[in-house]
């Protein structure tokens, strides 16, 4: 019985060593809940300043909760390019866990590319 317990423990430890411990991004994706976030929390998203963040909050107050992530594009100032930049960092459920401003990729122009 003790031998089986030791063997199970060793196998379990080997599994952890081989697969590694989950990182913060694996354990919990940092995101902003667009249904509950404050203006300050929304400004942590790339290419979202205080004006667009306030529009998001105003839109939410007027129209209710966002039913899908794509509904965010109904807000003036959030077009397809901006949406694609912020999509990995937003959610419509759970808590807002993002705590630092996300910088957009260097090759992102945010304009029409000209």
Image (tube, grey):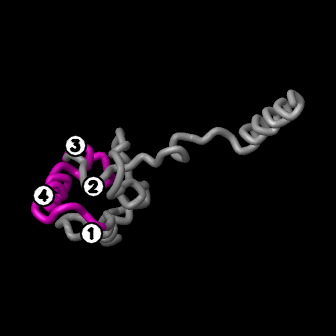
User: What is the magenta segment's predominant secondary structure?
Assistant: helix
Residue 17 inside the magenta-drawn segment: no
Task: Tell us which disc is closer to us: 3 or 2.
Answer: 2
Name the residue rendered at 30%, 46% in the picture.
44
User: Which secondary structure lies at badge 3?
Assistant: helix
Q: Earlier in the sequence, mark 2 or mark 1?
A: 2
**Residue 23 screen position, x and y as percent:** 57, 41
Is 2 placed above or below 21 here?
above
**Residue marked by disc 4:** 61
Q: Quote the CA–CA distance across marks 2 and 4.
A: 12 Å
User: Which secondary structure lies at badge 1?
Assistant: helix
**Residue marked by disc 3:** 40
User: Which secondary structure lies at badge 4?
Assistant: helix
Residue 34, label in figure: 2
In the image, is 28 to the left or to the right of 81?
right
Q: Are marks 3 and 1 in contact (CB under 8 Å)?
A: no
Q: Quote the CA–CA distance across marks 3 and 2.
A: 12 Å
**Residue marked by disc 1:** 71
Name the residue rendered at 22%, 61% in the picture.
65
The segment highlighted magenta reads 39-67
Q: Quote the CA–CA distance across marks 4 and 1.
A: 14 Å
Q: Earlier in the sequence, mark 4 or mark 3?
A: 3
Q: Tell which residue pokes out farthest to the right in this image.
A: 3
**In front of the other: 98 or 66:** 66
Q: Earlier in the sequence, mark 4 or mark 1?
A: 4
**Residue 1 screen position, x and y as percent:** 87, 31
Task: Tell us which disc is closer to us: 3 or 1.
Answer: 1
Q: Tell which residue pokes out farthest to the top in this image.
A: 2
Binning the other alpha carbons within 10 Å of mark 3 as few (below 14), some (14 to 19) or many (20 upward) gives: few
Q: Quote the CA–CA distance across marks 4 and 3.
A: 16 Å
Q: Earlier in the sequence, mark 3 or mark 1?
A: 3
């Amino acid at each position: 019985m003790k031998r089986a317990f030791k063997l199970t423990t060793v196998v379990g430890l080997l599994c952890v060593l081989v697969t590694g411990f989950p990182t913060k991004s694996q354990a919990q994706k940092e995101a902003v809940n667009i249904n509950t976030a404050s203006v300050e929390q929304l400004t942590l998203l790339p290419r979202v300043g205080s004006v667009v963040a306030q529009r998001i909050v105003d839109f939410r107050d007027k129209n209710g909760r966002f039913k899908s992530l794509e509904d965010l594009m109904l807000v003036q100032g959030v077009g397809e390019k901006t949406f694609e930049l912020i999509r990995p960092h937003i959610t419509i459920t759970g808590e807002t866990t993002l705590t630092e401003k996300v910088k957009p990729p260097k090759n992102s122009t945010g304009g029409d590319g000209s």
